[in-house]
Image (cartoon, grey):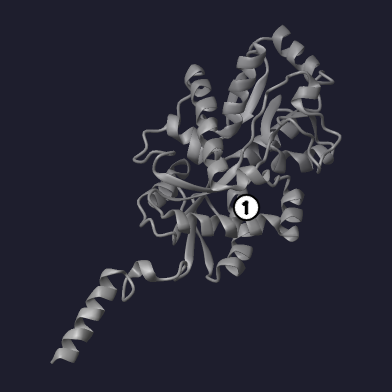
Amino acid sequence: MKTRKVLLLSFTFAAALGLVGSPKAQVYPSRPITVVVPFAAGGPTDTVARLIAEPMRASLGQPVIIENVTGAAGSIGTGRVARAAPDGHTLVVGFWGTHVLNGVLYPLQYDVLKDFEPISLLATNPQLIVAKNAMPAKDLNELISWLKANPGKASQATAGAGSPAHVGGAFFQSMTGTRFQFVPYSRGAAPAMQDLIAGQVDLMFDQTSHSLPHVRAGKIKAYAVTANARLPSAPDIPTVDEAGLPGFYVSVWAGMWAPRGTPAGVIAKLNGGVMRALADQKVRERFADLGQEVPAPALQTSEGFGAFHRAEIDKWWPIIKAANIKGE
C-alpha cells in the first residue's frame, strides 16, 4: 500500500511539472505544420511559400503542408490563422497586401499586427515603373514632365482598388504632383498587362516578377525599379534614386507569421528553419529567376521582421487614407 502511494505521489508530482503526459513536454514540432497561403496556387505568394516549405521540412523534421485558402483579398485565410491554436502548427505566409494594406482598406475581424507573431521576412519584390512602348518619355524625369503637362490624360492599369499597383500609383502621384486615371482590372494583373502591351493603357506599377519578362521581350518599356539598389536580374534598369525620384520605394514583400501567443521557443525554431531555407543556394537561385530578392539577414530575424512590419504600416496607412483609397 505504501509503495502504491509513493508511486502515485511520484506520478502526480511529475505530471504537475509537465513531465508526464503534458502536451507542452512534446518536442516541437510534434506533427505536420500547415502553412496557409490566402491565395490560389501558382501566384507569387504561393510560389514563395512552396519554395521555403521543402527545406523547412528537412530542417524541422516534419512535413510542411501548403494549404490555399482564398477569398476576400486574402482575409479569409489570414483570419483563419489569427484564430488558430498558438502552438506553431498553423502558420500563414502573407504579403504586403494581407498584412499592411488590408488593415486600412477593410473592416477585418482581426488586427494585422497585434494578432500575429512575426517569424521572418521571406522575400522582397520591388515594383517596376513600366509604360507602353508608344509613351514618348524616354526616362523617368521625362515621364513625370509629360504627366504634369497632360494632367488627367494618362491611364494606369491596376488590379483593383487598394491593390499594390493602385497604392503604388497613388504614392507616385503624391510624390510627383501628377494626376492620371486609374483603370481597375478585376481579373488581375495579367489582363492589365495585355492591355498595356496593346497600348490600351499607358502605365503600370507592377511587380518585377510579372513585368520583367515583357520588358526583356521588348513589349513594354521600363523607367525604374522602386528600390534603392538595382536588380541583379535586371542590372540595366536604374533605381528610382538614379532615375530622379529618390525615396520612391515600393516592395511587394512576403512574410511568415504565427498566431499571437505562440511561445517564443517555437518562434525561434521556426525562424531557424526559415533562415536555413533562405540560405539554401537552390532557393536563392530560384528567387532570382522569379525577380524575388532574399532579405538582408537582419530582416530575416523575427525581431527585425516585426520592426519592419510596424514601419510599413506607419508608412502606408497615412498614404492610403490621404488618397481616400477604399477596398472593393
Identify the residue at horizontal 49%, vertical 54% (top origin). Answer: 267
Kindly indicate the quadrant of the structure image that contains residue 21: bottom left
In the picture shown, does residue 31 fall above or below 245?
below
Identify the residue at horizontal 49%, vertical 17% (top origin). Answer: 322
Residue furthest right in the image:
236
Give residue 175's position: percent from left, percent from top. 64, 16
Q: Which residue is mark 1?
A: 48
Give residue 249's position: percent from left, percent from top. 66, 28
Give residue 23's position: percent from left, percent from top. 34, 69
In the picture shown, does residue 234 fall above or below 59?
above
Identify the residue at horizontal 50%, vertical 23% (top origin). Answer: 320
Identify the residue at horizontal 30%, vertical 69% (top origin). Answer: 17
Kindly indicate the quadrant of the structure image that contains residue 230: top right
Q: How many marks?
A: 1
Kindly indicate the quadrant of the structure image that contains residue 147: top right
Is residue 277 found left or right of 130 in the rendered image?
Answer: left
Amino acid found under the numbered disc labelled 1 = Val
